[in-house]
Amino acid sequence: RKLGVVDATWKPPVMLLLVVGLFIVFAARSAGYDVQPLADRFVSPAEASDEITPENVAALEEKWRYRTGAIGPFKSTPILEGDTLYTCAPANIIIALDAETGAERWTYDPQVEVIEELPFSKNCRGVTYFRAPEGYGGECPERIITATTDARLLAVNARTGGLCSDFGDDGTVDLLPGMGEVKSGFYFVTSPATIARGRAIVGGWVMDNIEVNEPSGVVRAFDVLTGEFAWAWDMGRPGNNRQPAEGESYTSGTPNVWSFTSFDEALGLIYVPTGNATPDYFGAHRLPETEPYSSSIVALDVEDGSVRWHFQTVHHDIWDYDVPARPHLTDIRQEDGSIVPAVIVPTKRAELFVLDRRTGEPLYDVEERPVPQEPAEGDWLSPTQPFAVGLPNFRTPDIREEDMWGITPWDHLWCRIDFNRLRYEGHFTPPTVEGSLIHPGAAGGFNWGGVAVHDELQLVVANPMIMPTRVRLVPREEMPEAHMQPQLGTPYGVDWFFFLSPIFTPCLEPPWGRLAVVDLQTQKVLWNRPIGSLNLGVELPMGLPQIAGTQVTDTGVIFHAATVDGVARAIDLLSGETLWQSDLPGASDATPMLYDTPVSNRQRFVVQVPSGGMFSAGAADEEGGYVIAYGLP
């Protein structure tokens, strides 16, 4: 187990046997406890969708499939309103489908300006539906709201697919005014607007690691009927929620809100997850006004955008540990029987922070713990970081040399050597000029798929990815001219990628993707298992990378389709057993959905698969991505 003690006479068949043995061991590493008492918590509401159950889910069959005609990432989750499913294909193409049959009703193509070398310029994670109040006399009483990757907010008639001319300028609100100089490809909106009290609230994604003072991370609200500006939260202008005056702009380089936001109607609060100020891996230049809000969950007053409370998950984040997922709202039963409104905050660190959503106070213990110091010259670090010790995390223990992995002895040896070259002192090892290992990496832990929650059983379904990254800061004078991530305005560029061998296999032993269930009442892991398999004639449960989320039925079935093996699965919530699976045309990069058909009243499970996505099978197909619906016979 020491570096160098590697028998060069090992043969590939022997290595394969060892790898298979490892898979069996990993498959057996699942912690759990007696699940029988949980069954007593089921008190299904009368209106719940309860057709698909653990007992009958094995009979699921495909009911229909639709092809989008669009190539590229297909990350949206459809929504149901009335008898229509609404989703968005790459480049913000809105699609309306008959919820019973999957037949196309209409499409609307906003003709987004796509930057081919930037995959993010095609991202669309969903659309939002709005019905006008009774008595509204405009042309679009029902409308679909979407924000585009070329910085527009659109309102489209939900019944016809035409633009709503009474919204903004003939159906469009330009999101660039007030943003100052915005270079091509530096500002996108990739996640759907949240509709709250007649307002559409949007954040934005900015280019990573190119330069300081990139476009503002401002969050804005617009009237959902007229498109008129309502308010802005610009953390660099505390107390000023208005549009900038002529010749001025929102504060540049502030942490942005690129993921989903949530709304609590009773409290009047919008919950926004923030990233960090650009660039990601050096922070000495960041504004003191913005530091408390980076990598945080922030509760904004829906009426004026003012901050009610905020909670930071990483202090002075130089690891790209954005809060990436929708803040999940649920109600938690306390031991005394009282109900506390909570918000669950999944992080790239693979931690789950659970807060009282009225105040931001943690509901489970959070400790400030010492972390590694000595950052790159010119930067600084917080001496401590917050750890959610009241709930389990999914980081895995600190990495050791013996945790290195390879398909052959040669790439295994390479990974061991590279591990020993890198600085690694556990979680929060800072980026350095010598090169550092960051675990979890910039993709998580959790990412934008977030978590699912069975509210009645108080169970959280978690599907973290475990994939470290190798990060090296490059002094400015040593940088190649065309370096892709120059971090201009700082002393260093950054060279980072996943911790892979020269043949692009992970250096850390599997599993790289897990599915687990956490009981909020006991604060224990109910079960924890690898998710995703390698099929070499026999299915090897490796645990594969994943990024999108899961859904869970009232009856206790988890639906998952986000692993890179391209398989949709139904899994028992209480035991972790796979109850059903179906091969997909490629790997889904979207969180699936569940709905009841409006006419036949049958439950459907819907998954989307891209054409030409990162993990799609084969070349891009001109027929485009897939929307596939499954149901019982």
Image (cartoon, helix red, strand yellow):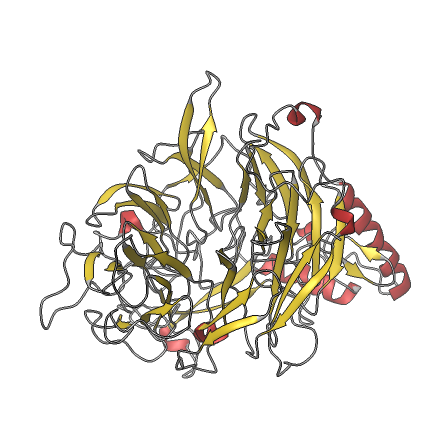
**Percent x, y for residue 429?**
48, 51
**Percent x, y for residue 101?**
62, 64
**Residue 355 in view of the camera:** yes
* Near-viewer residue (180 or 106): 106
- Residue 193, image quadrant: bottom left
Q: Is residue 612 above or below residue 216?
A: below
* Near-viewer residue (579 or 284): 579
* Near-viewer residue (491 or 358): 358
* Near-viewer residue (389 or 423): 389
Q: Is residue 485 left or right of residue 71?
A: left
Identified at 52% across, 59% down, the residue is 83
Q: Residue furthest left?
A: 246
- Residue 108, image quadrant: bottom left
**Percent x, y for residue 24?**
82, 47
Report the label total. 0
**Residue 9 in view of the camera:** no
Q: Is residue 498 left or right of residue 11?
A: left
Identified at 39% across, 54% down, the residue is 375
**Percent x, y for residue 557?**
66, 43
Q: Is residue 439 left or right of residue 222?
A: right
Identified at 52% across, 61% down, the residue is 85
